[in-house]
Image: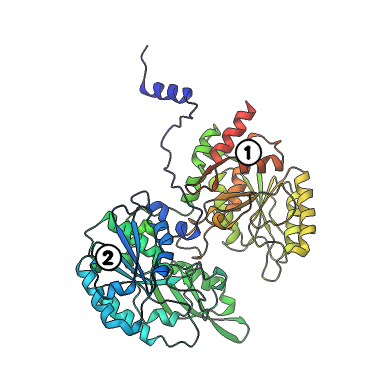
Amino acid sequence: MKITLSFLVLLLCTVLNITAYAGSVPPIIPPTGDFKTNFLNFPQAWTVTKGKGVKIAVLAAELKTAEAQIPTVSRSAPAAEVRAFRTNHFAALSPLLDTFRVILLWETNEKEAPSLIKAIEHYRNKGCVVILPAYQGPMQAGHDYRARHHFIKRASQAGAVIVGAHGRAYQLGNLDFWKKITVDTYALHTGIDGDQAFNPEFMADEPLQTPSLVVAGAIALLRAQDPKLEPMHLKKFLRGKGRKVTWYRIQIEWSKGKPEQICRPFLSYESMTEFMERFKKYKPKPLDMFRGSCLDAGLLLGLEPLGNGEWSYQALKTEQAHRLMKMSTAQVGSGVTVALLDHMFDQEHPSLKGRLVHPGSVTNAPVFSSAGHGTWMAETLLKIAPAVNIMPVRIISDTQEGADYYIKGIQYAVKNGADIISLSHREVPSAQRAAFDAAIKKATQKGIVCVFIHYQGKCNDVVIPSPVEFAGYDERKDISYIVGTNFINKNSFPYTWGVSQTAPIAAGVIAMMKQLKPKLTPLQIKELLLSSVTNTPDGFPLLDAAKVVEAIKSDIR
């Protein structure tokens, strides 16, 4: 008998109880449980290098201060050697620093500018990259920044890499400060919250040098990949190999006849014009603009950027789960109806055409308007379960929002035959949770699975998805973790990082489960989701759709 290679592979897989898949499976990039690390795309960069062979020096006025920064740098470049020194070693051109390829000046005093500039030039000539935060300490309204501006300009001309800070929504706070200097790269500062995106005068109340720590790690990765890259060329490299963000200062009349200014970041011209069109009734008028390059460790190493949501789908093992379903991908989710309780649905959008059942609105606004949050949720859902029926239920309008409309939306979905309800909006206030829970109980009693990203009630069968990036800050054990930070594309708002998207992703996995075994109860589904996980390298449970399907199919047999 002629034995083929494919037969031997199949036989080996059978013996080892391994599923043999036809075709290639995309490589999985393990995420971490840290928001900043994932947001800046370090896990993708680590597939190339973790900084082995590169020595990083962190300098501060006090040795203890410098030592306290080492863990953050090491998390970004785990294979690099990181040591702490006092700043006076730098200004004195100490031979202790001669073997270091990356030097981070955590603290500097503008009064010592002449000796610092001389030292920056000295180490640049030795091929060492010196990193300098554009600003240190918290920003304060009315502060005189002229001395800092002058020092940073001279340091940049001498070869230092200048690091700026942006928040989770890419907002900058005092835009005028950043416009007067050349920043080589902006990196995430988690002390600024995304809800401040519309406040042009927002001042950061935490030290703005923290982004320089992850930039030091990223440069160590780059130096490990290309040791001969000169410091001045590296500065240009940073500017050219990042996420391009344009900040616009816009005059807008939120209240009639009362113009005010907002500072809004955009990842593309198209997203800016989309914003202008969406809010045209408020008379938006761009006043000025400002461009910058934001750190992405994967892009910095020349890696192909992942598509919108691609990392999340890979880490979920979506493709493997589809193959285990033993049907074509186009059939996954067939016969299952998912109610998306949301707003801004576009019935002409390709993601909705041919998939709609029982669309409705429980507000004073029509169910369909334009592409937006609801449409994005539908796009995400169909990546996981392409054949589901989508029930768009509008629960938010310009004047109506809140728990009362969430409840009405759930009631509408139950009445019209939904199998799954997905909700990607704010949590319900404590005073209204009892009424909200009552609506959920009526749904779950009919076998409907409720998915809510911010659920805080007492129904233990509600599926609560969340980005794994927040797992390091969350002590709850009833959350299904999903990669969230890959949900950025050129036409989305820059701060769309995937909290909302976790709900339709979980709903898509549940659609697979219901398709395979319709009689599973909501509680059984939640328990199966929580038990079907793969741990991240730092030990956080990540939802594994392939394990979910395997468990159900095994039980069916």
| In the foreground, 17 or 26 | 17
Residue in the picture at 52% in, 52% down? 483
| In the foreground, 480 or 378 | 480
The extreme left residue here reads 125
Helix, strand or loop at mark 1: helix
Badge 2 density bin: few <14, some 14–19, many ≥20, Cα 10 Å = many
Give the amino acid at mark 2: Leu
Q: Is residue 45 above or below residue 398?
A: above
Total tally of numbered discs in the picture? 2
Q: Quadrant of the N terminus?
A: top left
Q: Which mark is residue 352?
A: none
Q: Which mark is residue 513?
A: 1
The residue singled out by tag 2 in the image is: 234
- x, y percentage for residue 527? 66, 41
Q: Is residue 241 above or below residue 438?
A: below
- x, y percentage for residue 272? 48, 71
Residue in the picture at 47% in, 63% down? 491
- N-terminal-most mark, 2 or 1: 2
Q: Is residue 10 above or below residue 228?
A: above
Q: Is residue 42 above or below residue 88?
A: above
Give the amino acid at mark 1: Met
Helix, strand or loop at mark 2: helix
Residue in the picture at 41% in, 43% down? 27
Q: Is residue 191 visible?
A: yes
Q: Is residue 433 found left or right of 515 in the rendered image? A: right
Badge 1 density bin: few <14, some 14–19, many ≥20, Cα 10 Å = many
Spatial separation of the CA atoms under disc 2 and disc 1:
50 Å
Q: Is residue 473 found left or right of 441 in the rendered image? A: left
Q: Quadrant of the C terminus?
A: top right
Q: Is residue 352 visible?
A: no
- x, y percentage for residue 126? 20, 66
Q: Is residue 70 found left or right of 160 in the rendered image? A: right
